[in-house]
Amino acid sequence: MDSEAQTRGRGGMRTADVMRAIRSKVAGRALSAGDRLPSIRSLATTMGVSPSTVVEAYDRLAAEGLIRARRGSGFYVSPTVTPPLALTEVEPRRDRAVDPFWVSRQSLDTDAAVPKPGCGWLPPDWMPEEALRRAVRALGRSEASVLTNYGSTSGSLALRRLLLTRLAEDAIEASINQLMLTGSGTQATDLVCRFLLRPGDTVLVDDPCYFNFRALLRAHQVKIISVPYTPSGPDVTRFEAILASERPRLYITNSALHNPTGATLSLPTAHRLLTAAAAHDLTIIEDDIFGDFEPERSPRLAALDGLNRVIRIGSFSKTLSASVRCGYIAARADWIEHLVDLQIATSFGGASPVATEIIAKVLAGGSYRKHMDELRHRLTRARRDVARKLGALGIEPWLTPRGGFFLWCRLAGEQDATQVARTALSEDVVLAPGNVFSVSQTASDFMRFNVAHMNDPRMWDVLRRALKARPE
Protein backbone atom coordinates (compact mmCIF):
# COMPACT_ATOMS: atom_id res chain seq x y z
CA MET A 1 0.00 0.00 0.00
CA ASP A 2 1.46 3.43 -0.94
CA SER A 3 1.82 6.25 1.59
CA GLU A 4 -1.20 8.16 0.23
CA ALA A 5 -3.44 5.12 0.68
CA GLN A 6 -2.09 4.60 4.20
CA THR A 7 -2.88 8.21 5.03
CA ARG A 8 -6.43 7.83 3.70
CA GLY A 9 -6.81 4.66 5.75
CA ARG A 10 -5.67 6.32 8.96
CA GLY A 11 -7.89 9.30 8.26
CA GLY A 12 -10.89 7.03 7.76
CA MET A 13 -10.25 5.29 11.07
CA ARG A 14 -9.96 8.61 12.86
CA THR A 15 -13.19 9.81 11.33
CA ALA A 16 -14.87 6.59 12.46
CA ASP A 17 -13.48 7.11 15.98
CA VAL A 18 -15.02 10.59 16.15
CA MET A 19 -18.36 9.30 14.87
CA ARG A 20 -18.30 6.43 17.37
CA ALA A 21 -17.58 8.86 20.23
CA ILE A 22 -20.55 11.07 19.29
CA ARG A 23 -22.89 8.10 18.88
CA SER A 24 -21.83 6.79 22.30
CA LYS A 25 -22.59 10.14 23.95
CA VAL A 26 -26.02 10.25 22.32
CA ALA A 27 -26.76 6.61 23.25
CA GLY A 28 -25.72 7.28 26.85
CA ARG A 29 -27.65 10.58 26.92
CA ALA A 30 -24.59 12.65 27.65
CA LEU A 31 -25.88 14.48 24.55
CA SER A 32 -29.66 14.77 24.23
CA ALA A 33 -32.00 15.97 21.49
CA GLY A 34 -31.29 19.62 20.70
CA ASP A 35 -27.94 19.75 22.51
CA ARG A 36 -25.12 21.61 20.79
CA LEU A 37 -22.09 19.50 19.89
CA PRO A 38 -18.56 20.65 20.74
CA SER A 39 -17.06 23.07 18.23
CA ILE A 40 -14.97 21.53 15.47
CA ARG A 41 -11.77 22.99 16.85
CA SER A 42 -12.40 21.99 20.50
CA LEU A 43 -13.36 18.40 19.61
CA ALA A 44 -10.32 18.10 17.36
CA THR A 45 -8.10 19.15 20.26
CA THR A 46 -9.85 16.81 22.72
CA MET A 47 -9.58 13.76 20.45
CA GLY A 48 -6.16 14.56 19.01
CA VAL A 49 -7.32 14.69 15.38
CA SER A 50 -7.33 17.34 12.69
CA PRO A 51 -10.26 19.77 12.31
CA SER A 52 -10.89 18.33 8.84
CA THR A 53 -11.44 14.89 10.43
CA VAL A 54 -14.11 16.33 12.74
CA VAL A 55 -15.74 18.16 9.80
CA GLU A 56 -15.97 14.90 7.86
CA ALA A 57 -17.36 13.02 10.89
CA TYR A 58 -19.98 15.73 11.50
CA ASP A 59 -20.97 15.73 7.82
CA ARG A 60 -21.44 11.95 7.84
CA LEU A 61 -23.48 12.04 11.06
CA ALA A 62 -25.62 14.81 9.56
CA ALA A 63 -26.17 12.67 6.46
CA GLU A 64 -27.35 9.86 8.77
CA GLY A 65 -29.77 12.25 10.45
CA LEU A 66 -28.20 11.95 13.90
CA ILE A 67 -27.14 15.62 13.99
CA ARG A 68 -28.08 18.82 12.16
CA ALA A 69 -26.07 21.85 11.15
CA ARG A 70 -27.32 25.35 11.94
CA ARG A 71 -25.74 28.02 9.81
CA GLY A 72 -23.47 30.23 11.88
CA SER A 73 -24.26 28.32 15.07
CA GLY A 74 -22.72 24.86 14.80
CA PHE A 75 -23.99 21.28 14.98
CA TYR A 76 -26.82 20.01 17.18
CA VAL A 77 -28.30 16.62 18.05
CA SER A 78 -31.40 16.14 15.91
CA PRO A 79 -34.57 16.73 17.94
CA THR A 80 -36.16 13.36 17.13
CA VAL A 81 -33.33 10.86 17.23
CA THR A 82 -32.20 10.57 20.85
CA PRO A 83 -32.58 6.81 21.48
CA PRO A 84 -33.60 5.10 24.71
CA LEU A 85 -30.76 4.87 27.21
CA ALA A 86 -28.63 1.88 26.21
CA LEU A 87 -26.37 1.12 29.15
CA THR A 88 -24.22 -1.34 27.23
CA GLU A 89 -23.34 1.43 24.77
CA VAL A 90 -22.24 4.00 27.34
CA GLU A 91 -18.72 2.56 27.58
CA PRO A 92 -16.59 1.02 24.80
CA ARG A 93 -18.08 -2.31 23.76
CA ARG A 94 -16.50 -5.23 25.60
CA ASP A 95 -16.90 -8.98 25.51
CA ARG A 96 -20.09 -9.71 27.44
CA ALA A 97 -18.09 -12.04 29.67
CA VAL A 98 -16.47 -8.98 31.27
CA ASP A 99 -19.49 -6.68 31.12
CA PRO A 100 -20.80 -5.65 34.57
CA PHE A 101 -24.26 -6.93 33.63
CA TRP A 102 -23.04 -10.34 32.52
CA VAL A 103 -22.65 -12.17 35.84
CA SER A 104 -25.92 -10.70 37.11
CA ARG A 105 -27.86 -11.90 34.09
CA GLN A 106 -26.34 -15.37 34.13
CA SER A 107 -26.81 -15.79 37.88
CA LEU A 108 -30.40 -14.52 37.94
CA ASP A 109 -31.69 -16.16 34.76
CA THR A 110 -30.15 -19.63 34.77
CA ASP A 111 -31.97 -22.61 36.25
CA ALA A 112 -31.80 -23.08 40.03
CA ALA A 113 -29.99 -26.38 39.51
CA VAL A 114 -27.08 -24.70 37.69
CA PRO A 115 -24.01 -24.26 39.96
CA LYS A 116 -23.36 -20.55 40.54
CA PRO A 117 -20.00 -20.07 42.30
CA GLY A 118 -19.89 -16.64 40.69
CA CYS A 119 -23.12 -15.33 42.24
CA GLY A 120 -23.35 -12.92 45.16
CA TRP A 121 -25.82 -14.56 47.54
CA LEU A 122 -26.21 -17.63 49.73
CA PRO A 123 -28.07 -20.81 48.74
CA PRO A 124 -31.64 -21.26 50.05
CA ASP A 125 -30.63 -23.90 52.59
CA TRP A 126 -28.19 -21.44 54.22
CA MET A 127 -30.96 -18.95 54.98
CA PRO A 128 -33.26 -18.91 58.09
CA GLU A 129 -36.18 -20.58 56.37
CA GLU A 130 -38.11 -21.52 59.52
CA ALA A 131 -37.84 -18.02 61.02
CA LEU A 132 -39.07 -16.55 57.74
CA ARG A 133 -41.99 -19.00 57.61
CA ARG A 134 -43.00 -18.06 61.19
CA ALA A 135 -42.89 -14.38 60.23
CA VAL A 136 -45.00 -15.03 57.13
CA ARG A 137 -47.58 -16.95 59.20
CA ALA A 138 -47.72 -14.08 61.68
CA LEU A 139 -48.17 -11.70 58.76
CA GLY A 140 -51.48 -13.40 58.00
CA ARG A 141 -52.77 -12.21 61.36
CA SER A 142 -51.67 -8.61 60.80
CA GLU A 143 -53.98 -5.71 60.04
CA ALA A 144 -55.36 -5.67 56.51
CA SER A 145 -53.53 -2.42 55.81
CA VAL A 146 -50.19 -4.24 55.97
CA LEU A 147 -51.32 -6.49 53.13
CA THR A 148 -53.06 -3.85 51.01
CA ASN A 149 -51.68 -0.33 51.56
CA TYR A 150 -48.68 1.56 50.28
CA GLY A 151 -45.80 1.88 52.71
CA SER A 152 -45.25 5.08 54.65
CA THR A 153 -42.78 7.50 53.13
CA SER A 154 -39.91 6.76 55.54
CA GLY A 155 -40.84 3.13 56.14
CA SER A 156 -41.93 1.01 59.09
CA LEU A 157 -41.30 2.76 62.39
CA ALA A 158 -40.81 -0.59 64.15
CA LEU A 159 -38.08 -1.69 61.74
CA ARG A 160 -36.38 1.72 61.81
CA ARG A 161 -36.20 1.55 65.61
CA LEU A 162 -34.59 -1.89 65.37
CA LEU A 163 -32.11 -0.51 62.84
CA LEU A 164 -31.21 2.38 65.15
CA THR A 165 -30.23 -0.19 67.78
CA ARG A 166 -28.08 -1.99 65.24
CA LEU A 167 -26.43 1.26 64.14
CA ALA A 168 -25.62 2.01 67.79
CA GLU A 169 -23.72 -1.31 67.94
CA ASP A 170 -21.44 0.16 65.26
CA ALA A 171 -21.06 3.36 67.36
CA ILE A 172 -23.22 5.27 64.87
CA GLU A 173 -25.38 7.72 66.79
CA ALA A 174 -28.49 8.51 64.75
CA SER A 175 -32.03 9.71 65.36
CA ILE A 176 -35.19 8.32 63.79
CA ASN A 177 -35.33 11.22 61.31
CA GLN A 178 -31.88 10.24 60.00
CA LEU A 179 -33.10 6.87 58.78
CA MET A 180 -35.36 5.79 55.92
CA LEU A 181 -36.26 2.46 54.38
CA THR A 182 -36.04 1.70 50.65
CA GLY A 183 -37.11 -1.06 48.31
CA SER A 184 -33.59 -2.58 48.33
CA GLY A 185 -29.95 -1.77 48.96
CA THR A 186 -29.53 -1.06 45.25
CA GLN A 187 -32.44 1.37 45.33
CA ALA A 188 -30.83 3.08 48.31
CA THR A 189 -27.66 3.69 46.28
CA ASP A 190 -29.71 4.79 43.27
CA LEU A 191 -31.65 7.36 45.34
CA VAL A 192 -28.44 8.84 46.74
CA CYS A 193 -26.99 9.05 43.23
CA ARG A 194 -30.15 10.77 41.97
CA PHE A 195 -29.87 13.24 44.84
CA LEU A 196 -26.17 14.08 44.53
CA LEU A 197 -25.14 13.50 40.92
CA ARG A 198 -25.70 15.10 37.54
CA PRO A 199 -24.61 13.69 34.15
CA GLY A 200 -20.91 14.30 33.65
CA ASP A 201 -20.02 14.30 37.36
CA THR A 202 -17.07 12.17 38.45
CA VAL A 203 -17.56 9.22 40.82
CA LEU A 204 -14.76 7.25 42.47
CA VAL A 205 -15.01 3.49 43.09
CA ASP A 206 -12.55 0.85 44.26
CA ASP A 207 -10.63 -1.29 41.82
CA PRO A 208 -11.84 -3.98 42.01
CA CYS A 209 -15.36 -3.13 43.19
CA TYR A 210 -18.86 -4.62 43.25
CA PHE A 211 -19.77 -4.78 39.57
CA ASN A 212 -23.31 -3.43 40.01
CA PHE A 213 -21.88 -0.14 41.32
CA ARG A 214 -20.45 0.27 37.83
CA ALA A 215 -23.68 -0.79 36.14
CA LEU A 216 -25.77 1.62 38.23
CA LEU A 217 -23.39 4.53 37.65
CA ARG A 218 -23.67 4.02 33.90
CA ALA A 219 -27.38 4.75 34.20
CA HIS A 220 -26.51 8.06 35.88
CA GLN A 221 -24.20 8.98 32.98
CA VAL A 222 -21.25 9.91 35.16
CA LYS A 223 -17.52 9.57 34.68
CA ILE A 224 -16.29 6.54 36.63
CA ILE A 225 -12.72 6.49 37.94
CA SER A 226 -11.12 3.96 40.26
CA VAL A 227 -8.56 3.68 43.03
CA PRO A 228 -6.56 0.48 43.64
CA TYR A 229 -7.75 -1.52 46.64
CA THR A 230 -5.30 -2.97 49.17
CA PRO A 231 -5.76 -5.44 52.06
CA SER A 232 -6.40 -2.49 54.42
CA GLY A 233 -8.61 -0.39 52.15
CA PRO A 234 -8.08 1.86 49.14
CA ASP A 235 -4.54 2.96 48.33
CA VAL A 236 -4.60 6.17 50.37
CA THR A 237 -1.82 7.95 48.49
CA ARG A 238 -3.61 7.35 45.18
CA PHE A 239 -6.94 8.26 46.81
CA GLU A 240 -5.60 11.64 47.90
CA ALA A 241 -4.03 12.30 44.50
CA ILE A 242 -7.27 11.43 42.67
CA LEU A 243 -9.30 13.73 44.89
CA ALA A 244 -6.89 16.58 44.16
CA SER A 245 -6.74 16.03 40.40
CA GLU A 246 -10.21 14.70 39.48
CA ARG A 247 -12.43 16.32 42.14
CA PRO A 248 -14.94 13.43 42.31
CA ARG A 249 -18.36 14.24 43.73
CA LEU A 250 -18.90 10.85 45.31
CA TYR A 251 -17.00 7.75 46.49
CA ILE A 252 -18.80 4.38 46.81
CA THR A 253 -17.22 1.58 48.84
CA ASN A 254 -17.72 -1.33 51.26
CA SER A 255 -15.98 -0.88 54.61
CA ALA A 256 -16.63 -4.32 56.04
CA LEU A 257 -15.65 -7.43 54.04
CA HIS A 258 -15.12 -5.56 50.81
CA ASN A 259 -16.73 -7.00 47.69
CA PRO A 260 -15.06 -8.77 45.88
CA THR A 261 -11.77 -8.91 47.82
CA GLY A 262 -13.01 -9.69 51.35
CA ALA A 263 -10.57 -7.08 52.72
CA THR A 264 -11.28 -5.04 55.86
CA LEU A 265 -10.74 -1.30 56.21
CA SER A 266 -8.07 -0.41 58.79
CA LEU A 267 -8.49 2.42 61.29
CA PRO A 268 -5.49 4.49 60.02
CA THR A 269 -6.76 4.18 56.45
CA ALA A 270 -10.26 5.21 57.52
CA HIS A 271 -8.97 8.36 59.24
CA ARG A 272 -6.92 9.38 56.20
CA LEU A 273 -9.86 8.79 53.87
CA LEU A 274 -12.12 11.03 55.94
CA THR A 275 -9.47 13.75 56.22
CA ALA A 276 -9.05 13.77 52.44
CA ALA A 277 -12.80 13.72 51.90
CA ALA A 278 -13.27 16.75 54.13
CA ALA A 279 -10.50 18.63 52.35
CA HIS A 280 -12.02 18.03 48.92
CA ASP A 281 -15.76 18.14 49.76
CA LEU A 282 -16.28 14.47 48.89
CA THR A 283 -19.39 12.53 49.90
CA ILE A 284 -19.01 8.83 50.66
CA ILE A 285 -21.56 6.02 50.33
CA GLU A 286 -20.59 3.24 52.75
CA ASP A 287 -22.39 0.05 51.75
CA ASP A 288 -22.46 -2.20 54.83
CA ILE A 289 -24.39 -5.08 53.33
CA PHE A 290 -21.79 -7.67 54.48
CA GLY A 291 -21.18 -6.20 57.94
CA ASP A 292 -23.11 -8.87 59.85
CA PHE A 293 -20.75 -11.55 58.54
CA GLU A 294 -17.81 -10.09 60.50
CA PRO A 295 -16.78 -11.99 63.65
CA GLU A 296 -15.83 -8.70 65.32
CA ARG A 297 -16.84 -5.26 64.10
CA SER A 298 -14.19 -3.35 62.12
CA PRO A 299 -14.01 0.47 61.74
CA ARG A 300 -16.96 2.14 60.04
CA LEU A 301 -16.56 5.41 58.17
CA ALA A 302 -20.09 6.44 59.17
CA ALA A 303 -19.24 6.06 62.86
CA LEU A 304 -16.00 8.03 62.61
CA ASP A 305 -17.68 10.73 60.53
CA GLY A 306 -20.95 10.96 62.48
CA LEU A 307 -23.09 10.76 59.31
CA ASN A 308 -21.86 14.14 58.18
CA ARG A 309 -20.44 13.42 54.73
CA VAL A 310 -20.73 9.61 54.95
CA ILE A 311 -24.04 7.97 54.00
CA ARG A 312 -24.60 4.48 55.37
CA ILE A 313 -26.71 2.05 53.35
CA GLY A 314 -27.55 -1.60 53.86
CA SER A 315 -30.08 -4.38 53.39
CA PHE A 316 -30.87 -7.93 54.46
CA SER A 317 -30.74 -9.68 51.08
CA LYS A 318 -27.46 -11.46 51.94
CA THR A 319 -28.38 -12.54 55.47
CA LEU A 320 -32.17 -13.10 55.47
CA SER A 321 -33.75 -13.22 52.05
CA ALA A 322 -33.12 -11.86 48.56
CA SER A 323 -36.85 -12.27 47.93
CA VAL A 324 -38.06 -10.15 50.85
CA ARG A 325 -36.39 -6.95 49.63
CA CYS A 326 -35.76 -3.97 51.89
CA GLY A 327 -32.87 -1.54 52.17
CA TYR A 328 -32.12 1.49 54.30
CA ILE A 329 -30.30 4.81 54.23
CA ALA A 330 -28.79 6.52 57.28
CA ALA A 331 -27.70 10.10 56.62
CA ARG A 332 -28.05 13.73 57.67
CA ALA A 333 -31.65 14.55 58.56
CA ASP A 334 -31.92 17.31 55.95
CA TRP A 335 -30.70 14.91 53.25
CA ILE A 336 -33.16 12.23 54.36
CA GLU A 337 -35.97 14.74 53.79
CA HIS A 338 -34.94 15.19 50.17
CA LEU A 339 -34.33 11.48 49.66
CA VAL A 340 -37.83 10.68 50.92
CA ASP A 341 -39.25 13.07 48.31
CA LEU A 342 -37.17 11.36 45.62
CA GLN A 343 -38.46 7.97 46.68
CA ILE A 344 -42.04 9.22 46.45
CA ALA A 345 -41.34 10.61 42.99
CA THR A 346 -39.76 7.42 41.69
CA SER A 347 -41.70 4.65 43.47
CA PHE A 348 -44.55 6.34 45.39
CA GLY A 349 -44.18 5.38 49.01
CA GLY A 350 -41.46 3.63 50.95
CA ALA A 351 -40.48 0.01 51.30
CA SER A 352 -43.13 -2.71 51.08
CA PRO A 353 -45.04 -3.08 54.38
CA VAL A 354 -45.12 -6.84 53.78
CA ALA A 355 -41.33 -7.02 53.48
CA THR A 356 -40.64 -4.71 56.42
CA GLU A 357 -43.11 -6.58 58.65
CA ILE A 358 -41.40 -9.92 57.91
CA ILE A 359 -37.90 -8.53 58.49
CA ALA A 360 -38.92 -6.75 61.70
CA LYS A 361 -40.45 -9.92 63.12
CA VAL A 362 -37.31 -11.96 62.37
CA LEU A 363 -35.01 -9.32 63.88
CA ALA A 364 -37.15 -8.83 66.96
CA GLY A 365 -37.67 -12.55 67.56
CA GLY A 366 -34.12 -13.30 68.68
CA SER A 367 -33.49 -15.96 66.04
CA TYR A 368 -31.49 -13.64 63.79
CA ARG A 369 -28.43 -13.47 66.04
CA LYS A 370 -28.39 -17.25 66.42
CA HIS A 371 -28.73 -17.61 62.65
CA MET A 372 -25.78 -15.25 62.04
CA ASP A 373 -23.62 -17.05 64.64
CA GLU A 374 -24.27 -20.36 62.89
CA LEU A 375 -23.72 -18.80 59.49
CA ARG A 376 -20.35 -17.32 60.47
CA HIS A 377 -19.12 -20.70 61.77
CA ARG A 378 -20.38 -22.52 58.69
CA LEU A 379 -18.71 -20.01 56.38
CA THR A 380 -15.42 -20.26 58.27
CA ARG A 381 -15.35 -23.99 57.52
CA ALA A 382 -16.41 -23.44 53.90
CA ARG A 383 -13.73 -20.79 53.26
CA ARG A 384 -11.06 -23.10 54.66
CA ASP A 385 -12.21 -26.14 52.68
CA VAL A 386 -12.70 -24.25 49.39
CA ALA A 387 -9.33 -22.49 49.72
CA ARG A 388 -7.66 -25.87 50.15
CA LYS A 389 -9.37 -27.32 47.06
CA LEU A 390 -8.59 -24.22 44.98
CA GLY A 391 -4.97 -24.39 46.11
CA ALA A 392 -4.73 -27.90 44.70
CA LEU A 393 -5.65 -26.37 41.32
CA GLY A 394 -3.01 -23.67 41.65
CA ILE A 395 -5.60 -20.99 42.53
CA GLU A 396 -4.58 -18.86 45.51
CA PRO A 397 -6.69 -16.36 47.52
CA TRP A 398 -5.42 -12.77 47.40
CA LEU A 399 -5.96 -12.71 51.18
CA THR A 400 -7.74 -14.72 53.87
CA PRO A 401 -10.93 -12.79 54.73
CA ARG A 402 -12.09 -12.35 58.32
CA GLY A 403 -15.58 -13.44 57.30
CA GLY A 404 -18.12 -13.56 54.50
CA PHE A 405 -18.52 -15.93 51.58
CA PHE A 406 -16.16 -14.54 48.92
CA LEU A 407 -12.62 -15.56 48.01
CA TRP A 408 -10.84 -13.24 45.57
CA CYS A 409 -8.30 -15.46 43.87
CA ARG A 410 -5.51 -15.31 41.32
CA LEU A 411 -5.48 -18.07 38.73
CA ALA A 412 -2.32 -20.05 38.17
CA GLY A 413 -0.02 -19.14 35.30
CA GLU A 414 -1.72 -15.80 34.60
CA GLN A 415 -4.63 -17.58 32.95
CA ASP A 416 -7.38 -15.51 31.38
CA ALA A 417 -10.32 -15.67 33.80
CA THR A 418 -12.72 -14.49 31.10
CA GLN A 419 -11.87 -17.48 28.93
CA VAL A 420 -12.20 -19.82 31.91
CA ALA A 421 -15.64 -18.36 32.72
CA ARG A 422 -16.78 -18.65 29.11
CA THR A 423 -15.71 -22.29 28.95
CA ALA A 424 -17.42 -23.08 32.28
CA LEU A 425 -20.66 -21.44 31.16
CA SER A 426 -20.75 -23.74 28.13
CA GLU A 427 -21.08 -26.53 30.72
CA ASP A 428 -23.69 -24.67 32.80
CA VAL A 429 -21.47 -23.31 35.58
CA VAL A 430 -21.58 -19.56 36.27
CA LEU A 431 -18.25 -18.01 37.31
CA ALA A 432 -17.29 -14.38 37.99
CA PRO A 433 -14.12 -13.34 36.10
CA GLY A 434 -11.99 -10.58 37.62
CA ASN A 435 -12.41 -7.88 35.00
CA VAL A 436 -16.16 -7.79 35.67
CA PHE A 437 -15.13 -6.00 38.89
CA SER A 438 -12.31 -3.85 37.48
CA VAL A 439 -12.81 -0.39 35.96
CA SER A 440 -9.19 -0.40 34.77
CA GLN A 441 -9.53 -3.95 33.38
CA THR A 442 -6.41 -5.06 35.29
CA ALA A 443 -7.85 -8.19 36.95
CA SER A 444 -7.78 -10.54 33.97
CA ASP A 445 -6.15 -13.35 35.99
CA PHE A 446 -8.45 -13.00 39.02
CA MET A 447 -11.78 -14.61 39.84
CA ARG A 448 -14.30 -14.24 42.68
CA PHE A 449 -15.57 -17.49 44.18
CA ASN A 450 -18.64 -17.83 46.42
CA VAL A 451 -17.65 -20.59 48.85
CA ALA A 452 -21.27 -21.39 49.77
CA HIS A 453 -21.97 -22.47 46.18
CA MET A 454 -18.98 -24.78 45.78
CA ASN A 455 -20.10 -28.08 47.30
CA ASP A 456 -21.31 -29.56 44.00
CA PRO A 457 -18.77 -32.08 42.61
CA ARG A 458 -19.92 -31.20 39.06
CA MET A 459 -18.71 -27.64 39.58
CA TRP A 460 -15.19 -28.80 40.48
CA ASP A 461 -15.06 -31.11 37.44
CA VAL A 462 -16.11 -28.27 35.15
CA LEU A 463 -13.62 -25.87 36.75
CA ARG A 464 -10.77 -28.34 36.22
CA ARG A 465 -11.67 -28.73 32.54
CA ALA A 466 -12.10 -24.97 32.06
CA LEU A 467 -8.66 -24.31 33.55
CA LYS A 468 -7.08 -26.82 31.15
CA ALA A 469 -8.94 -25.55 28.07
CA ARG A 470 -7.06 -23.42 25.58
CA PRO A 471 -8.59 -20.53 23.59
CA GLU A 472 -9.63 -21.50 20.09
Image (cartoon, helix red, strand yellow):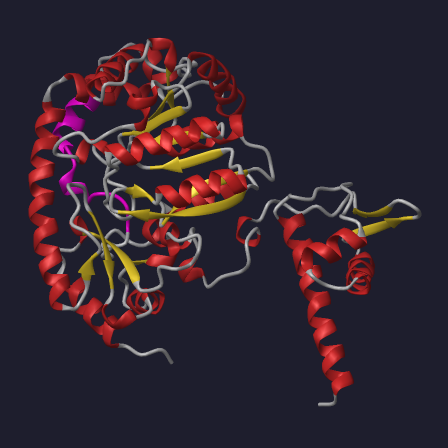
Q: Quadrant of residue 269?
A: top left
242 in relation to 431, above or below: above
Q: In this rendered view, identify the residue nearer to me: 262 or 238.
A: 238
- Residue found 41% across the figure and 28% down from its top: 188
Q: Quadrant of the C terminus?
A: bottom left
Whether residue 369 is situated above or below residue 431 in the rendered picture: above
Q: Is residue 240 visible?
A: yes
* Horizontal side, residue 267 vs residue 198: left or right: left
Q: Is residue 374 left or right of residue 76?
A: left
338 or 310: which is nearer to us? 310
Which secondary structure type mostly characterizes the magenta part of the structure? helix
Residue 378 as seen in the image, left or right of residue 266: left
Region of the chain picked out in magenta, as a range: 119-136
Residue 402 falls within the magenta-colored stretch: no
Q: Residue at x 57, y 51 (%)?
A: 90
Name the foreground residue: 320 vs 323: 320
Which corner quadrant holds the N terminus?
bottom right
Place of residue 304 in the rendered image (x, y in percent of width and height, measured from the top left): 30, 23
Q: Position of residue 436 (x, y in %)?
A: 38, 55
Q: Does 122 appear in magenta?
A: yes
Near-viewer residue (264 or 428): 264
At x 70% / y 75%, what residue is drawn? Answer: 10
